[in-house]
């Protein structure tokens, strides 16, 4: 096993489950950055924090399937197998580039940035093993209407990898709720494939990550779907708005940072706009949810003050208001990947083994640091019943 893979520390295992009705793991899309989420999950698993509900978009959907589609004792192993498969050791151009930089005595962030760019270029040319491969003929030279004309890459290898590493019968058994989001190409509407409403197949996972023009749309039951990140790159709202509401401890693992410095050149501008586009306004969503919960709590207190006979529960509008009242509590724990100085806008398709290991270790260590704060696992006593944590 690669030397950068974090060594598990079982000392942070919890003595008992936190006092919440459900634990949710929410995984954002972000391509090659997704091994950060695998590192986060390893730390959670070692702490005995096993989710009751896992939801993801794009690469988050793949990681979600690897978690829900394996027994607890094999989930980290399945994640590890996937990420080692799609990040085969460097060869060809990156290897030559590394040797050239070494011979020239070029080191530091500049050298690492150049090496990462070489790896990203190799991915563009060769694809990622067990994930996607370039089409022999570019889409511009293929017949309109053919699958070859839809995208630069073929994702057939991903289907085979998912079938090898994921037990879809386990996912559909429903012990852990599972949700992945995609966009209906025809209607433009966002749709979630959820174990409460669908029988999950590899196609649902692939659809969630079918980002054009790299990947083709995925056909499911006569409809075509693209990457859910085109509309919303995080499943946070789906989980928080779902009924019936429950006391929830949610770990929101983002791969793109909404906050960042003002860029100083065109390369920085490209990177910054990508971060903003795919960050999906997670903080705005949590602030909005907090306001909603405060209103629900206020409504609940109002209902308690009014005599039951005066509520006129036969009135559908009053009944609707009463149904919205609740005293549920939510801890939303945000873990956000912070890119290194040498990472460029190609960071989501830079599938090198070295970078994968670094992302995994970052996720693992960030989760460990977060779990050292005991308030994360305690029921909030805020007026709105919502506590939001971000220790980065």
Image (cartoon, rainbow, N blue to C red):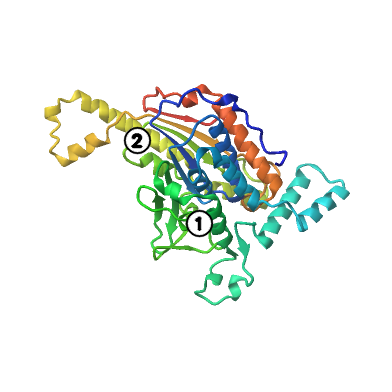
Q: Along the horizontal axis of the image, is 72 left or right of 244?
A: right
Observer-nearest of 98 and 306: 98
**Residue 323 percent coordinates (x, y):** 24, 36
**Residue 272 percent coordinates (x, y):** 60, 47
- Outermost residue, bottom direction? 143
Q: Secondary structure at mark 1?
A: helix
Q: Along the horizontal axis of the image, is 78 left or right of 331?
A: right
Crowding at mark 2 (Cα within 10 Å: few <14, some 14-19, many 20+): some
**Image quarter of the C terminus:** top right
**Residue 33 percent coordinates (x, y):** 60, 46
Residue carrying label 1: 206
Q: CA distance from mark 1 to mark 2?
A: 33 Å
Residue 346 visible, this orientation = no
**Residue 55 percent coordinates (x, y):** 46, 44
Residue 191 lies in what quarter of the image? bottom left
Residue carrying label 2: 292
Q: Nearer the viewer's eye, disc 1 or disc 2?
A: 1
Residue 30 visible, this orientation = yes
Crowding at mark 1 (Cα within 10 Å: few <14, some 14-19, many 20+): many
The residue located at (51%, 50%) in the rendering is: 166
Lower sequence index among marks 1 and 2? 1
The residue located at (39%, 49%) in the rendering is: 194
**Image quarter of the N terminus:** top right
Q: Is residue 243 above or below residue 8?
A: below
Residue 329 lies in what quarter of the image? top left
């Amino acid at each position: 096993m690669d030397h950068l893979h974090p060594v598990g520390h079982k000392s942070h295992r919890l003595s008992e489950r936190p006092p919440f009705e459900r634990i949710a793991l929410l995984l954002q899309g972000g391509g090659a950055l997704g091994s950060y989420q695998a590192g986060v999950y390893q730390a959670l698993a070692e702490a005995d924090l096993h989710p009751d509900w896992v939801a993801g978009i794009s690469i988050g959907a793949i990681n979600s399937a690897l978690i829900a589609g394996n027994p607890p004792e094999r989930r980290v192993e399945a994640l590890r197998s996937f990420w080692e498969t799609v990040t085969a050791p460097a060869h060809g151009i990156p290897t030559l580039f590394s040797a050239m930089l070494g011979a020239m005595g070029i080191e530091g962030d500049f050298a690492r940035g150049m090496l990462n760019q070489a790896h990203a270029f190799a991915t563009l040319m060769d694809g990622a093993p067990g994930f996607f491969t370039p089409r022999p003929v570019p889409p511009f030279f293929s017949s309109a209407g053919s699958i070859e004309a839809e995208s630069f890459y073929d994702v057939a290898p991903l289907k085979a990898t998912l079938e090898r590493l994921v037990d879809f019968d386990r996912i559909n058994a429903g012990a852990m709720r599972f949700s992945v989001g995609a966009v209906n190409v025809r209607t433009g509407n966002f749709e979630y494939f959820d174990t409460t409403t669908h029988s999950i197949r590899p196609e649902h996972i692939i659809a969630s990550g079918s980002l054009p023009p790299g990947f083709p749309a995925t056909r499911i039951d006569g409809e075509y779907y693209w990457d859910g990140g085109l509309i919303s790159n995080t499943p946070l709202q789906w989980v928080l708005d779902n009924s019936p509401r429950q006391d929830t401890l949610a770990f929101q693992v983002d791969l793109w940072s909404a906050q960042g410095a003002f860029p100083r050149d065109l390369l920085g501008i490209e990177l910054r706009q990508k971060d903003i586009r795919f960050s999906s306004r997670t903080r705005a969503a949590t602030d909005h949810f907090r306001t909603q919960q405060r209103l629900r709590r206020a409504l609940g207190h109002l209902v308690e003050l009014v005599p039951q006979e005066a509520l006129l529960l036969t009135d559908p509008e009053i009944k609707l208001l009463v149904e919205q009242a609740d005293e549920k509590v939510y801890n939303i724990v945000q873990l956000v990947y912070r890119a290194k100085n040498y990472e460029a806008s190609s960071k989501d398709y830079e599938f090198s083994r070295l970078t994968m290991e670094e992302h995994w270790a970052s996720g693992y260590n960030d989760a460990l640091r977060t779990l050292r704060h005991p308030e994360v696992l305690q029921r909030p006593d805020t007026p709105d019943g919502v506590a939001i944590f971000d220790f980065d």
